[in-house]
Image (cartoon, rainbow, N blue to C red):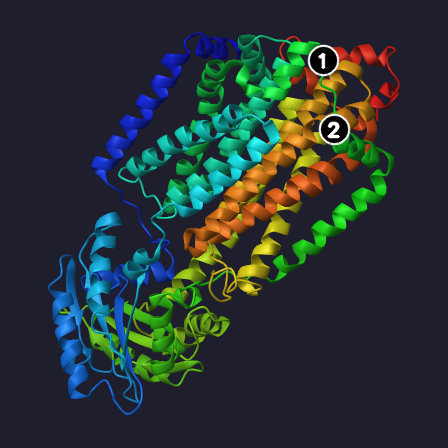
Amino acid sequence: MAAIARWCVRHRFAAVLLWLLALGAVAGAAGVAGSSYTNDYEVPGTPSGRAAALLDAGFDGGGGDGNTVVWHTAGRTTVQAAGVQQSMTRTLDAIEDLPGVATVISPYEREGAGRISADGHTAYATVTFGAQAGDALERQAKAVVDTAKDAETAELQVELGGSAIALTETSSGHVSEIVGVVVAAVVLFVAFGSLAASLLPIATALVGVGTAYAGIVLLGHVMTVADFAPMLGMLVGLGVGIDYALFIVTRHRRGLRRGLSVTEAAVDAVATTGRAVVFAGATVCIALLGMLILRLSFLNGVAIAASLTVVLTVAASVTLLPALLSLIGARALSRRERRQLAEHGPRPDLPTGFAARWSAFVERRPKLLGAVAAVVMLVLALPTLSLHLGTSDQGNNPASTTTRAAYDLLAEGFGPGSNGPLTLVAEVDGSDDRAAMAALEGAVRTTEGVASVSPVTYNGSGDTAALTVVPQSSPQSQDTSELVDRLRDSVLPQVQQGTSLDVYVGGVTASYDDFAEVIVGKLPLFVGAVIALGCVLLLLAFRSVGIPLKAALMNVLAVTSSFGVVVAVFQWGWGSELLGLGSAGPIEPFLPVIMVSVLFGLSMDYQVFLVSRMYEEWLETGDNRRAVRVGLAETSRVINSAAVIMIAVFLAFVLSGDRVIAMFGIALAAAVALDAFVLRTLLVPALMHMLGGANWWLPRRLDRWLPRISIEPPGSPTAHEKIDVQRTGGPEGSQQLVP
């Protein structure tokens, strides 16, 4: 690490230029290629996945999502009034002529029969787009929205819904990123007192994240990448990128205050704190890449995209940042610090103020404070017990959006189930199968929870049959999930008996329920693998059995408590409308996996930075109480500053307008806040004080067998050498080493 830093400092202009060229080249290639993301979260092989595949094959893409134009009249005027019918017919004809629109099915045509509500005040048309994606589809959808909205009058309300229409409601101005960066810059300036030093972490993170963002665009052309992956990568990248740079700049400034030259301070910062940054980044990537265990194509893309962002932010922190530090020279210190250094010379950088007092306070009362911290975490984790994975649809959007208004109009005019009908589809072979399908229609019609059933429809070749079932409840309702189970477990087996039919239940609710079942089934293996890999890394780094086990426990507490906050806000609806996040609803099935990956990685960061300083002191003295006290006192301020920055960045993404990204933002902000202010500054040091020298215990045989990848500064004695010295007679506290 020292050699890398020395080269970057010596060739500072070349290092900066290489990064700018890389950013420009990748961004240029991404601009030419365009984006190619997916919002199809279907899991192949599940019953709903087979239903979608049969619809696509038998009905020429009939399994795809539809977009709707919904209009509503008030008073005595109905949607069948001559003026309304003429106006909307002209509008639908204009929409059908727009670029990218494949078909429009009007309720005023025979093919659109049944799309006028019983009271005559609500009607809807279905709009299907051609095979477009990304920016092209968003532009086409925006044209449809503008055209439809032109038909609105005082008596006629027009709203639109569907996945393509939803693209027009996402924030494209990067307001959330700007807000997060501005808040981070303010916190950095307050912490450093130097404008130049406060801007370097921002610049480093932006270059790394910008390069990664453009790289994710290109990645979407070679593998399946979910549409939220770029925003997730930017969210994680900005948070960890600014924090990693903050830790290195803090160490660099400490070196300057100790009298080191600019070059020596930069090299020392990368050789010491830079090692911890690389190690912390590796833990984040391992946690993210743990998603590959699930073998779900779109999650693979999310894992690789987010890991790419972390890798590039780490690389920028240990290469670009030292070059920038050498460029600003002594201005990394504030004017007051430079004046004191010139007048009084170098001074020891001892922890003082609140950090030192807090560290001593925790040392005096570890049991009481540890118990308080544990209770806080457990209480916040309680809502996780009611976690409901399911369909979070456009009915959960903010009330001001057109997609939410269209959803509500359809629910009011046609019943809540009209927003997420189920589709029963099967391959048919012969008259017996056709008779069974006819019987199925009658059996489903009398099933509890069914509002209506369409007649059986056959494709052109007659080998595929489908019927549409409208539930009495909304797509995200638990009652609809129970209806899916009822159809699969009771109704379909009776009808299929004695025939060659295999009828599959598809639709929004069925696909999300199947997805949730797959995720829940694989979650224990996934979480176990992530915890195990993280423990192995910490075991190698700190050569201790206790440190990895405590880290695993702390990570589980952080994840479950942050999940509790997410459930309270999004599922219970505590303040969700006030925050502009829409109404209460279930949690997306894929969120637990991604959040576990990201949260485990981020919580490892603070563990590494806190314990690495304790470990360094432990190697010097062999005194556990001193190591914990000094480590907490010296790192708590920078960890708290880093946490405030990360929380601000994550909470800013609530402004993105995307419910999924808002879930990520609140979950990550809650996890970082609890991790930094409850776990790392309270519960972890309290436990380490109570455990004494057992914190650093490692069986001799395992110590000899493990490879050495420790992150202590170069030249520090290795753990086993120092421990051997202390066992033969050392400072007070060393007798606790042997449990």
Query: With 495 as the anchor, is 391 left or right in this view?
Result: right
| Residue 124, label in figure | none
Q: Secondary structure at mark 2?
A: helix
Tell me residue 459's x, y (percent). 17, 70
Tell me residue 312's x, y (percent). 42, 28
Would you identify the image quadrant in which residue 688 lies? top right
First along the sequence among labels 1 and 2: 1
Mark toward the viewer: 1 or 2: 1
Circles 1 and 2: CB atoms closer than 8 Å: no
Tell me residue 63's x, y (percent). 26, 63
On the question of residue 738 being in view, the answer is: yes
Tell me residue 16's x, y (percent). 38, 18
Would you identify the image quadrant in which residue 83 lies? bottom left
Residue with the mark numbered 2? 633
Query: With 421 as the anchor, is 100 left or right in this view?
Result: left
Give the crowd class for mark 1: few <14, some 14-19, many >=20 residues within 10 Å.
Answer: few
Up-down: is 672 above or below 729?
below
Give the crowd class for mark 2: few <14, some 14-19, many >=20 residues within 10 Å.
Answer: many
| Residue 347, label in figure | 1
Q: Residue at x 49, y 12 (%)?
A: 5
Q: Nearer the viewer, residue 379 or 202?
A: 202
Query: With 628 as the anchor, is 535 left or right in this view?
Result: left
Q: Amino acid at mark 2?
A: Ala
Q: Amino acid at mark 1?
A: Arg
As measured in the structure, the alpha-carbon distance from the residue carrying label 1 to the one carrying label 2 is 18 Å
Up-down: is 75 above or below 201?
below
On the question of residue 296 being in view, the answer is: no
Name the image quarter holding the C terminus: top right
Query: With 454 as the anchor, is 184 left or right in this view?
Result: right
Q: Secondary structure at mark 1?
A: loop
Up-down: is 459 above or below 25?
below
